[in-house]
Amino acid sequence: KRKGFIFDLDGVIVDTAKYHYLAWKKLANELGFEFTLEQNELFKGVSRKRCLEILLEIGDIDATQEQFDRWMIEKNEDYLDFIDKMDASEILADVPRVLEFLKTRDLPIALGSASKNAKPILEKVGLLSYFNSIVDGNSVTKAKPDPEVFLIASSNLNVEPKNCVVFEDAIAGIQAANIAQMTSIGIGDSDTLVEADYNFNDFTEMSDSFLETLLK
Ligand code: BG6
Ligand code: MG
């Protein structure tokens, strides 16, 4: 059985959720309301457009199409200011060890992310070369929990969905992996990611012997 490995980006490989949060918070504050870290949980794995829709619901704001488009651009520009300053120090703990484990065994690796900024971020932190395929917000039409992003990755890797393993920090992402009949591994709070097949707080808790079991 040939196994394939699919990684989410934000919150799994790098801790960019904090930058998304700061950029959305700035916009909310400009529009005259608060946006909390707790509310930010709902934004994980969710497309930029859908995030703005939710933000405007929180602030009870009716936007014209023109305002909506402008705020989408403004949020992304603020987010990109943070991304510009990123380097390898922002890779989450033990991600390189896991990528290296897979790479030395010649196993195919894909990115499965909702972000349209995925490629530049991987380039910035120096991890782009690990990935055989990048499936991101520019290549999908349906957002997680729709399994589209992971199914495209599985087909790009030429590995059957049931032989794919997905690493995810978002509830919607775990659901997408489960719908695709893939092995889902929750990275983060196990109470939040209850639907995952396996749970780890982070990759430091994932032993090489556990990784070995995924290859079978
Ligand atoms: C996901 C993040 O990976 O990408 C979401 O978890 C984010 O919070 C989404 O909204 C889209 O990202 P971007 O970079 O295209 O705005
Ligand atoms: Mg994520």
Image: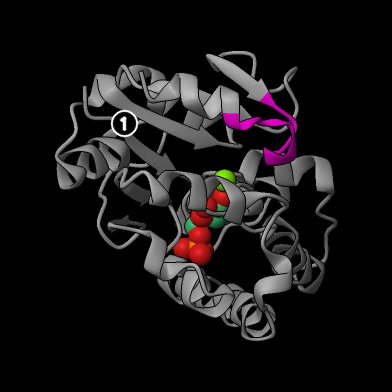
Q: How many marks?
A: 1
Say which element carries label 1. Answer: loop
Please give left or right for residue 25 compared with residue 181 in the image.
Answer: right
Residue at x 83%, y 59% (from the top left corner): 33
Image height of 25 relative to 123, above or below: above
Residue at x 74%, y 39% (from the top left corner): 204
Residue 1 sits in quarter? top left
Point out residue 12 in the picture as x, y percentages from the top left corner.
60, 47
Q: Is mark 1 within 8 Å of ligand 2?
A: no
How busy is the neighbourhood of tag 1: few (under 14 within 10 Å), some, or many (20 plus)? Answer: many
Residue 183 within the magenta-colored segment of the rendering: no
Which residue is disc 1 drawn over? 147
Residue 42 sits in quarter? top right
Depth check: 146 or 151 in front?
151
Residue 56 sits in quarter? bottom right
Image height of 163 relative to 140, above or below: above
Point out residue 39 in the picture as x, y percentages from the top left corner.
76, 42
Residue 172 seen: yes
Point out residue 99 in the picture as x, y percentages from the top left corner.
50, 51
- Residue stretch rendered in magenta on the structure: 200-208
Picture quarter with the C terminus: top left
Point out residue 199 in the picture as x, y percentages from the top left corner.
65, 21
> Mark 1 belongs to which amino acid?
Pro
Residue 112 seen: no
Residue 203 within the magenta-colored segment of the rendering: yes
Depth check: 77 or 123 in front?
123
Residue at x 51%, y 36% (from the top left corner): 167
Residue at x 50%, y 31% (from the top left corner): 172
Please give left or right for residue 67 compared with residue 119 in the image.
Answer: right
| Snapshot colouring | one colour
Depth check: 151 or 130 in front?
130
